[in-house]
Amino acid sequence: MPAPESINHKISPQFAARLKNYSPEQKVRVIVLLKSNNNIADNSQRQSRLARKAAIQAMQQSVQQAAQEIDRIIQDYGGKKLAKQPNILGTIPIEITPPGIQALALSDSVKAIIENQKIHSIHHSNIS
């Protein structure tokens, strides 16, 4: 198991603490934010439609390369993608084991890993 310090910047401390309580075989749903090699130099000026389209295409190609690199980790740890490909923001939902999450966090292709949690509404009657 990798040292916790090596993955702290990609997984929140709260999520890392919860992962310790899961069995190594348990499947966990996460959202993986992939790194993009595309650096858009200057966003201070409004881009033309063609420039925006080119930037989006470059981002998608870069994220696709990162997605291909993490496919091996997903397969090695018995995980599965919950979407066919990353979205425009470079995120992809995955179901994988805690050791698989740690392996993803060590990958240079991964920027961050977020636990895919249900969102609960606050009941107004509980607010004082």
Image (tube, rainbow, N blue to C red):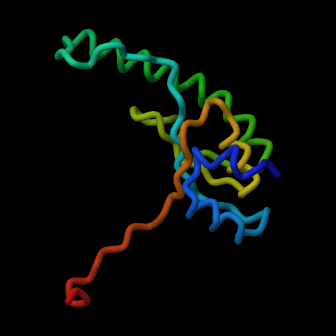
Q: How far across and how far down the image is residue 95, in percent?
A: 63, 54
Is residue 113 toward the left or the right of residue 1 in the image? Answer: left
The quadrant in which residue 39 appears is: top left
Q: How far across and how far down the image is residue 101, in percent?
A: 68, 50
Identified at 37% across, 16% down, the residue is 40
Foreground residue among 73 and 127: 127
Is residue 104 toward the left or the right of residue 111 in the image? Answer: right
Q: How far across and how far down the image is residue 88, in percent?
A: 39, 32
Indicate whether 65 appears above or below 49. below
Residue furthest out toward the right? 1
Indicate whether 94 appears above or below 24. above
Identified at 74% across, 39% down, the residue is 73
Q: How many marks?
A: 0
Foreground residue among 85 and 107: 107
Residue furthest out toward the front? 5
The quadrant in which residue 124 appears is: bottom left
Q: How far across and how far down the image is residue 51, in percent?
A: 27, 10
Indicate whether 95 appears above or below 70. below
Identified at 71% across, 66% down, the residue is 20
Identified at 19% across, 11% down, the residue is 48
Foreground residue among 63 and 7: 7
Is residue 68 toward the left or the right of residue 111 in the image? Answer: right
Q: Quadrant of the C terminus?
A: bottom left
Foreground residue among 118 and 109: 109
